[in-house]
Image (tube, helix red, strand yellow):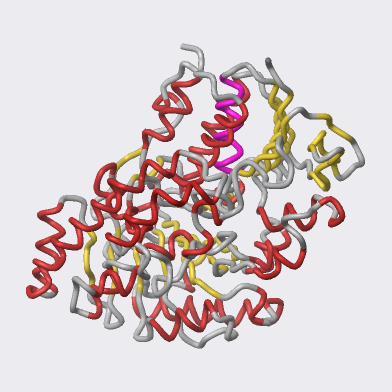
Amino acid sequence: MKQRVVVIGGGFGGLAAANRLAAKGHQVTLFEKRDKLGGRGYQYEINGFKFDGGPTVMTIPPLFDEIFAAAGKDRRDYFELVPLDPYYRIFSPDGEAFDYRAKEEDALAEVARWSPKDVEGYRKLLTQSERIFDRFYADTDRPYLHLRDMAAIMPPMISLRAFMGAYPFVSRYIKDDFLRRVFSYHPLLIGGSPLTTPAIYMLITKVERKWGVHYALGGTGAVVAGLGRLLEEQGARIHLATEVVEIIVQNRRATGVRLADGTLVEADEVVCNGDVAFAYRHLIPAEQRHVFTNRRIDRMQYSMSLFVIYFGTRRRYLDSKLAHHNVILNHRYKGLLKDIFSHRGLPEDFSLYLHMPTKTDPSIAPEGCESFYVLSPVSTLDSGVNWRTEARPYRDRIMQFLEDNYLPDLQANLVAEHWIDPLHFQNTLNSYRGAAFGLQPSLFQSGALRPHNRSEEFPNLYFVGAGTHPGAGVPAVLSSGKIAAELIDPSPSPD
């Protein structure tokens, strides 16, 4: 039976679920708070530059291909993904570069160049990461709705030591301190600390090796636009600049949503792509919630937040030592991570991710210009930092650091700039406490211990996005959309 489905939020999870359900003939209506689709993948356009607001690393193209194939379309007619090599260039505190390469033999050569004694350990690390992938990757595509679903994975979690923190796990195989950081920083891509995020998430390294790291020509915004166009072609209705302020619940079922202008929209099924903690706490009255009480929501562990500067220059920096994706590590590693995840205020130092997409795709900037985005992990709003006064000084420290070490005369050549901070994540993206990735991917907030894709409270309310299973990162969020769509309608898509 075809159903009326309301989707709250036009991020990757919402677009994935909406497209899959529309392909099966359901009546899909999507409401997006902002003026265009994307959620974390929103694309800013400033002075002729296109800046991707959030995710820039694209992996597992088949996850996108499936969505288009379900509608009888070819993803390549909507956007193009191009492989990158190196995947990332990682700079030591002294400015020396390590290229995280695509081919295993190239990666081994880089390890040998940096620390010959760690070549064999790196081989063993790759083997162990592959074992983790082989056992657990399939679980990212299926729902975890009951604690008993966890029983089957506990023995391999123990035997593979996948419960260990990523950094301690890597340290069993790698002895060089810098390489330990290089091979354990991936949890930061999904909002977790490498010190404590379980090594089960090391499957990400195998994901990259199996499918590669890609860039979407035109930026992440091109991917969002392609998914939005596909959704419209399938007859779904998309309402932009339309905020949902309440999920209507009657007799323990979601019956629709109320918009900011008071309009009530009825639904048979509701899919929420909003932050899970925010949605439960602010879209559903407390008296209706028995599982996700305010107390429980407040006690959950949240990811770090981010400070991100988007900037464009009137000159190119092709003679710099930068690659497309760059990670710049500082002298403090464990201490900085503990400061960030323990909400100890705003440290004087930082580690950075620097994105230089015009290295691959000059089309997203005016001719002769360069486009960048630099990201610094910071604490959530629990830290007590007053970002209304601290954002500008923090921006100045980061930009001066980049100018002194990587981009000469940077600030004299700026022609476009915008930044976001934890207040943006809270007030614009409705992220609880300004947590950029929702819940931390901790051992006790994974699988069935994470908020479920089908609500534990209301049987026809579904969650997609970073805060639910399987977690943050574009592939996981796309998988959450697949899980929710198949829970609503498990029938195969028409050919």
Instruction: Answer above or below: position of 466 versus 166.
Output: above
Where residue 189 appears, as percent x and y from the top left, is 43, 60
Where residue 4 appears, as percent x and y from the top left, is 74, 24
Give the residue displayed 59% in from the left and 81% down from the top. Answer: 343
Give the residue displayed 77% in from the left and 58% down from the top. Answer: 281
Give the residue displayed 59% in from the left and 59% down from the top. Answer: 438
Q: Pick the residue in front: 203 or 90.
A: 203
Instruction: Answer above or below: position of 53 versus 343.
Output: above
**Quadrant into which the N terminus falls:** top right
Res. 27 image quadrant: top right
Q: Main secondary structure of the magenta part?
A: helix
Q: Is residue 16 left or right of residue 409?
A: right
**Magenta-span inclusion, residue 33:** no
Q: Is residue 364 left or right of residue 131?
A: right
Where residue 474 appears, as percent x and y from the top left, is 47, 47
Where residue 292 appears, as percent x and y from the top left, is 72, 57
Q: What is the span of residues highlighted in magenta in the rendered image?
A: 11-23
Instruction: Answer above or below: position of 168 versus 7.
Output: below
Give the residue displayed 46% in from the left and 11% down from the top. Answer: 495
